[in-house]
Amino acid sequence: MTYPEALAYISRIGRFGMKLGTERTRAILDRIGRPDRGLTGALIAGTNGKGSTGACLASILQAAGHVVGFMPKPHLVSYTERIQIDGIPITERDFAQTLEDLKPTLDVIAAEMGPATEFEMLTAMALAYLAPRVDRLVCEVGLGGRLDATNALDLGVAVITNVDLDHQKYLGDTIEEIAREKAAIIKAGNRVITGCEGAALAIVEDYARKAGAALWRLGEEIQVESTSRGWDGHLVTVAGPGFEHRQLAVPLVGDYQPANAALAVATAHALDDVTDDAVRQGLAQTIWPGRLQVIATRPRVILDGGHNPAAMTKSGVSLRRLIGSERLVTVFSMLSERDPAALLAALQTLRPDRAVFTEATSAGGHSVPAVELASIFGHDAEAVLPPQAALDRARELAGVDGNVLVCGSLYLVGEILALRE
């Protein structure tokens, strides 16, 4: 099986196919010898910040001398990004071979329980490949928690970064409903690390108590202070039960990144007796593309994959703090499963001078039409296809001293990033 054949196979029921539940994933893993059993690490859920927290944690654990498997999602450019060892994605050849080895089991499960979804296959592939090769695993939850395929795993530590409104079609219409879905990743005897607040925190506390899980909360057991270094990130001081690390360099941009780094540091301590050197080196070397990432200058071109209103608003506040009153032109695309009114309202908070709307080719026809978005947004908006042409137009509108922000969809961000490579 070649890599293109592997991609065609896992996408055969559609890239956007979804069947919530852990039963089929658990059945696949059981059939191939339960490769996840005995793996130690962290399962990371939350509305926003999962990927950044996971990237920081994986880098710290690697600096501490571990061989670290990382399962981020979704990918930006290549499916291989979803299966990493020490920050290096699986090769296309190994990706295809892993699927080929797994295919007989997938066929048996399909006959008994129906065909696996793309996400279930990718989860099983990642575990089959990573388990024999790593001694720590960092796994980002896909959607929600309770019914996500990754919830078949028990890695010992459950992280819930935060809870906000997103994916209401699947998770519920209130913070409380969504918090229950995410808190359901907590297993008996886990250690739980969370950045949740208010009603969501109360629900996480309740789930942790019922599971007999030790709980560390940001702002309570975990304290964080930070100083912005502009486009260079932050200096962060983190303290928690039995540890304190002062003036850590975190290269990730965004006012919310110190909190993500603090959760990662606390999780590393929940897993291991990590040294100050490992924490310091790991954070300093963290790379997490597509999150307020600058890819060009004159004009400055920034990529941000925040694709729900809360993430876009937070990124917008951070961006405006960095650029002040400088000219800003946005390049925006979004998936049809999301609410245009809510996302465009978040886009308005960035106060763009001009907005260029487009459609991510890689979204396979699931983008909201650009002309529709431009019409809703109103003045100072236009529709330009394809994304490359939209970026060119935005750069022209921004001028050499301005800024271009590519946002709204990870598919769009990944497509623009791929053009650079």
Image (spheres, grey):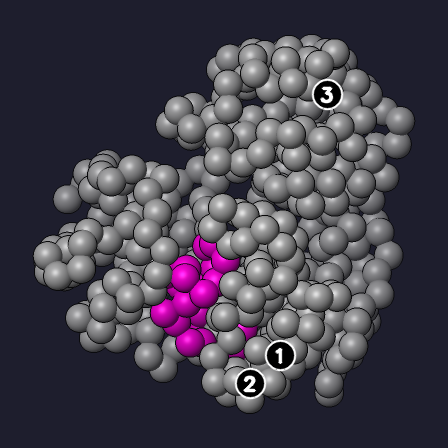
* In the foreground, 392 or 385: 385
In the rendered image, which quarter contains the N terminus? top left
Q: Residues within 10 Å of mark 3 (few under 14, many from 20)?
A: many
Q: Residue beneath label 1, please?
A: 206
Magenta region: which residues? 136-158
The nearer-to-camera label among 3 and 1 is: 1
Q: Is residue 36 magenta?
A: no
Visible residue check, residue 66: no
Q: For residue 134, what is the image quadrant?
A: bottom left
Q: Are marks 2 and 1 in contact (CB under 8 Å)?
A: yes
Residue 74's tag is none
Cα distance in 3D space between marks 3 and 1: 44 Å
* Residue type for callout 1: Asp
Tell which residue pokes out farthest to the right in this image.
325
Measured from the top left, where is residue 23 in percent x and y? Answer: 29, 66
- Going by the image, does 152 lie left or right of 12? right
Question: Quick one: label 3 or label 2, which is nearer the N terminus?
Answer: 2
- Going by the image, does 165 lie left or right of 325? left
Question: Quick one: label 3 or label 1, which is nearer the N terminus?
Answer: 1
- Residue at position x 60%, y 85% in the image: 209
Measured from the top left, where is residue 352 in percent x and y? Answer: 77, 23
* In the foreground, 22 or 52: 22
- Residue at position x 41%, y 60% in the image: 148
- Residue at position x 60%, y 29% in the image: 340
Q: For residue 150, what is the image quadrant?
A: bottom left
Q: Residue beneath label 2, please?
A: 210
- Residue at position x 50%, y 58% in the image: 144
Residue 329's tag is 3
* Residue type for callout 3: Val
